[in-house]
Image (spheres, grey):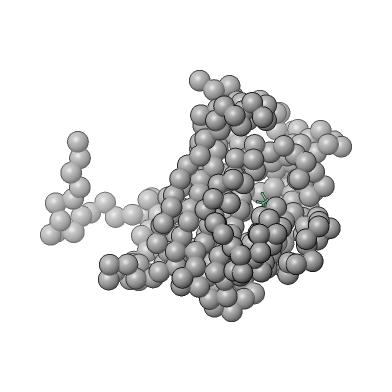
């Protein structure tokens, strides 16, 4: 069994609203040796591919980790975040003058016309978004039909280890947790399907030995799924089925247990 994450007494943890939490995290976000970030970055590059000459949106850009690399690789990048402290860090970096930054709360519609972007990138953000349907619909709307969206998020299995987005405040030594949502994999997948995306790539990535050797904090999660990745293409019609018109299914607690008369129900066992 992997070693468990040390549990802090709850009075050593500060639960903050998401924006305030990231405003505080901004100062050390880039030097935090975060294993999730280290695991995610090469995957994002692989899934996004060559962006030379493309228009790219970085949704929840934080300190500009992806936005700056994308701009350096030749993309025209627009980057949004609601944490002014995180954005400020981005703007201070070399290459930031190539990027258009927006202060924007993702709970609201994206400030772009339909079909603006060839690529939409959203890294390590959606575990903070309560209205997944709203954000996935917006990413679908702003993505060109020949483009695609790449999303990364902390794997929900990390919640089973008591982990959510968090950092240790270097001044107080207290753990700070910007508010997160307890989404499951199916919540992410169904939000994508309901928005009209085709699931082109889904994968779950675990910490491996090279990462654990490089970042000792990662070792306790060796072999454990830490990262979930999606690449989505915005086609609303697949095989003649308009997925955007599928009926919404009620949450499990209120879902009907009665099968339609013409159906024998599922085979079990
Ligand atoms: C873990 S950081 C990831 C930053 C960057 N994408 C990266 O991968 O390094 C999550 C970011 O999402 C932003 N965020 C969370 N909820 C948001 C919202 N409702 N509107 C805008 N930004 C949000 C936070 O401010 C933070 O910068």
Q: Where is residue 8 in the image (x, y as percent from the top left)?
A: 70, 28
Tell me which residue sits at (59%, 57%) in the image.
122
Q: Which of 73 and 137 is in front in this view?
A: 73
Is there any visible trace of residue 66 in the rendered image?
yes
Q: Which of 182 and 40 is in front in this view?
A: 40
Q: Position of residue 34 (x, y in %)?
A: 68, 38
**Left or right: where 261 falls relative to 250:** left
**Left or right: where 167 falls relative to 248:** right
Q: Where is residue 85 in the image (x, y as percent from the top left)?
A: 80, 56
With respect to residue 249, does 218 lie above or below? above
Instruction: Work out which residue is located at the far right of the displayed protein and give it.
Output: 171
Quadrant hosting residue 10 = top right
Tell me which residue sits at (61%, 32%) in the image.
211
Tell me which residue sits at (34%, 71%) in the image.
237
With respect to residue 266, does 120 lie above or below? below
Q: Where is residue 225 in the image (x, y as percent from the top left)?
A: 51, 36
**Left or right: where 202 falls relative to 209:** left
Position of the C terminus, as image quadrant, is top left
Is there any visible trace of residue 7 in the rendered image?
no
Image quarter for ligand 1: bottom right
Instruction: Work out which residue is located at the far bottom of the displayed protein and give it.
Output: 113
Quadrant hosting residue 67 = bottom right
């Amino acid at each position: 069994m992997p070693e468990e994450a040390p549990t802090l007494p709850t009075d050593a943890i500060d639960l903050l609203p998401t924006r305030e939490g990231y405003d505080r995290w901004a100062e050390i976000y880039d030097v935090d040796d975060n294993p999730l970030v280290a695991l995610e970055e090469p995957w994002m590059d692989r899934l996004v591919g060559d962006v030379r000459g493309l228009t790219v949106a970085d949704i929840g850009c934080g300190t500009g980790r992806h936005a700056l690399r994308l701009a350096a690789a030749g993309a025209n990048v627009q980057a949004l975040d609601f944490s002014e402290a995180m954005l400020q860090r981005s703007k201070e970096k070399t290459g930031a003058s190539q990027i258009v930054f927006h202060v924007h709360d993702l709970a609201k519609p994206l400030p772009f016309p339909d079909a603006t972007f060839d690529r939409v990138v959203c890294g390590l953000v959606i575990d903070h978004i309560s209205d997944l349907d709203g954000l996935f619909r917006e990413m679908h709307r702003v993505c060109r039909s020949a483009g695609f969206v790449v999303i990364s998020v902390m794997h929900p299995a990390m919640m089973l280890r008591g982990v959510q987005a968090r950092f240790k405040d270097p001044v107080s030594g207290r753990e700070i947790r910007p508010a997160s949502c307890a989404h499951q994999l199916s919540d992410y997948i169904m939000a994508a399907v309901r928005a009209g995306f085709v699931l082109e790539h889904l994968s779950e990535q675990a910490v491996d030995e090279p990462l654990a050797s490089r970042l000792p904090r990662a070792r306790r999660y060796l072999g454990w799924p830490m990262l979930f990745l999606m690449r989505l293409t915005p086609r609303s019609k697949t095989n003649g089925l308009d997925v955007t018109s599928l009926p919404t299914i009620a949450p499990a607690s209120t879902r009907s247990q009665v099968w339609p008369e013409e159906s024998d129900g599922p085979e079990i066992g």
